[in-house]
Amino acid sequence: MTDRALMERAIEARKMSYSPYSGFKVGAALLGKSGKVYTGCNVENAAYTPTNCAERTAFFKAVSEGEREFVSIAIVGGRYESIADFCAPCGICRQVMAEFCDKNFRIIMGNLDNIQVSTLEELLPLSFGKNDLE
Ligand code: THU
């Protein structure tokens, strides 16, 4: 699967965003090592803190369906109907990625006109992980 094809899946997933409080809609598409794609959107809440980001929605769907190894994730965001040039994952989502992904996991950001790719190691250096608990 190409980065562009995964970004297209994220744009489609973004349409399901439940974001009445921020108006910021995010979509994510996560590629598992099995080849299966898991999509997610942000799901907000009137109490604010229960809000779940699009990336974590995708991860939790995947893990709950038995997939634990991943290749890449595409992320797209923007207010209301507009798609932003760039939407980076929040710190909590980066930590969730670090639970299941190695340092070379690819994070694909932007939109169909401009795609930027970073590795998890670049976005979460010196991370705390399961190895630290051994
Ligand atoms: N959000 C995501 O879903 N993913 C990100 O990477 C950044 C932020 C959501 C959370 C909230 O619903 C809205 O965007 C505004 O922060």
Image (cartoon, helix red, strand yellow):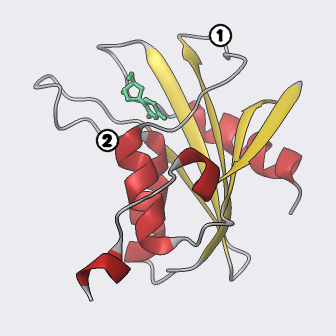
Residue 115, relative to residue 64: is it above or below? above
- For this view, does 62 lie left or right of residue 69? left
Name the foreground residue: 99 vs 73. 99
- For this view, does 44 lie left or right of residue 50? right
Residue 97, relative to residue 79: is it above or below? below
Cβ of mark 2 under 8 Å from ligand 1: the answer is yes
Q: Secondary structure at mark 1?
A: loop
Residue 79 coordinates in the image, percent (x, y) = 53, 11
Q: Which mark is residue 52?
A: 2
Q: Residue furthest left?
A: 47
Residue 21, relative to residue 107: is it above or below? above
- Quadrant position of ligand 1: top left
Name the foreground residue: 29 vs 130. 130
- Count neighbours of disc 2 (C-alpha within 10 A) and say few if under 14, some if 14 to 19, many if 20 or more: some
Q: Secondary structure at mark 2?
A: loop
Q: What residue appears at the point 36 percent right and 70 percent down from the top-left corner?
A: 129
Q: What residue appears at the point 42 percent right and 59 percent down from the top-left corner?
A: 127
Q: Residue furthest bottom?
A: 134
Which residue is under mark 1?
82
